[in-house]
């Protein structure tokens, strides 16, 4: 899940960035309205967290322009402007939720999950064989047994399950989960895949994470995996 945080105060932006990444989200930051609109034109986001008091465009102007696009992600306004008129205007202009600063981070996370659940066109639960991933509650089970995953492990597994049967290159995994370019040298993907295999495959007879030679990895039940020798 990819979130755009539009916040000009660096301290708050850094706090949101750290907290959301720890919760398993991929985060982009924009410090002004123009940058936010540029990012919205070039990137598909699952959610936007929008401050109203920006150094160039007012946040409400950003909201209006964002809502003029054919496809627009849910918008959660996060602002110190907590008056009734401000909240009503923001919601009337198309915001999906409004949270006043200062705020409790656990409440922000709960509202984010509610918005993603409301607007998510894909299933809330992903199932491959006896492996189940609850996208909203962020829980994973295999054969009814709860499996504890770190945030990045969860994000990789969710990405692979959403692309069941599709070979994913290391570049694709890095760019989706870490939101950075793959330099071709790091073995970070292989390390995390080993971690995932130790948790969801090693103790079970059916191995779901397949290595696709020359490409990367794929998640698929063995009886449906390719059998031409290119997948192991």
Image: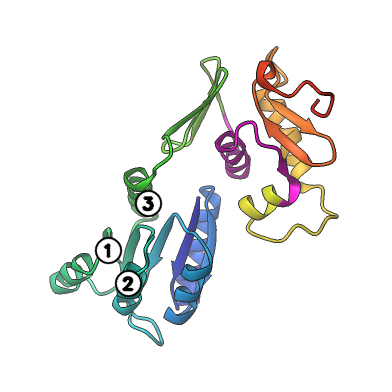
Find the distance from the CA under tag 3 to the CA under tag 2.
17 Å
Residue sitting at 43 percent across and 71 percent down? 6
Label 2 belongs to which residue? 63
Taking the spot 73% from the left edge, 20% from the top edge, the residue there is: 202
Secondary element type, mark 2: helix
Q: Position of residue 165 (x, y in %)?
A: 64, 31
Q: Is residue 56 above or below residue 228?
A: below
Disc on the earlier residue, 3 or 2: 2
Looking at the image, residue 97 sits to the left or right of residue 21; the answer is: left
Image x and y of residue 31, in percent: 48, 78
* Residue 162 magenta: yes
- Check whether the beta carbons of the residues at disc 1 and disc 3 lie within 8 A of each other: no
**Residue 154: percent from the left, percent from the top?**
58, 39
* Residue 102 shows in this picture: no
Residue holding disc 3: 112
In the rendered image, which residue does mark 1 sit on?
A: 95
Identify the mark at residue 208; answer none if there is no mark: none
């Amino acid at each position: 899940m990819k979130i755009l945080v539009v916040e000009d105060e660096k301290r708050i932006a850094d706090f949101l960035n750290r907290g959301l990444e720890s919760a398993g989200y991929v985060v982009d930051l924009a410090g002004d309205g123009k940058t936010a609109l540029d990012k919205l034109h070039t990137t598909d986001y699952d959610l936007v967290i929008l401050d109203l008091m920006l150094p160039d465009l007012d946040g409400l102007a950003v909201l209006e322009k964002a809502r003029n696009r054919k496809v627009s992600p849910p918008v959660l306004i996060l602002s110190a402007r907590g008056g009734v008129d401000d909240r009503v205007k923001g919601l009337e202009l198309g915001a999906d939720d409004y949270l006043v600063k200062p705020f409790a981070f656990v409440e922000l996370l709960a509202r984010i999950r509610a918005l993603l659940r409301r607007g998510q066109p894909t299933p809330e639960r992903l199932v491959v064989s006896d492996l189940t991933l609850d996208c909203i509650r962020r829980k994973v089970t295999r054969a009814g047994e709860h499996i504890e995953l770190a945030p990045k492990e969860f994000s990789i597994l969710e990405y692979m399950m959403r692309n069941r049967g599709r070979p994913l290159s290391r570049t694709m995994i890095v760019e989706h989960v870490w939101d950075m370019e793959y330099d071709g040298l790091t073995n970070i993907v292989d390390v995390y895949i080993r971690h995932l295999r130790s948790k969801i495959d090693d103790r079970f007879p059916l191995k779901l994470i397949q290595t696709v030679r020359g490409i990367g990895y794929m998640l698929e039940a063995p009886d449906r995996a390719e059998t031409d020798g290119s997948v192991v």
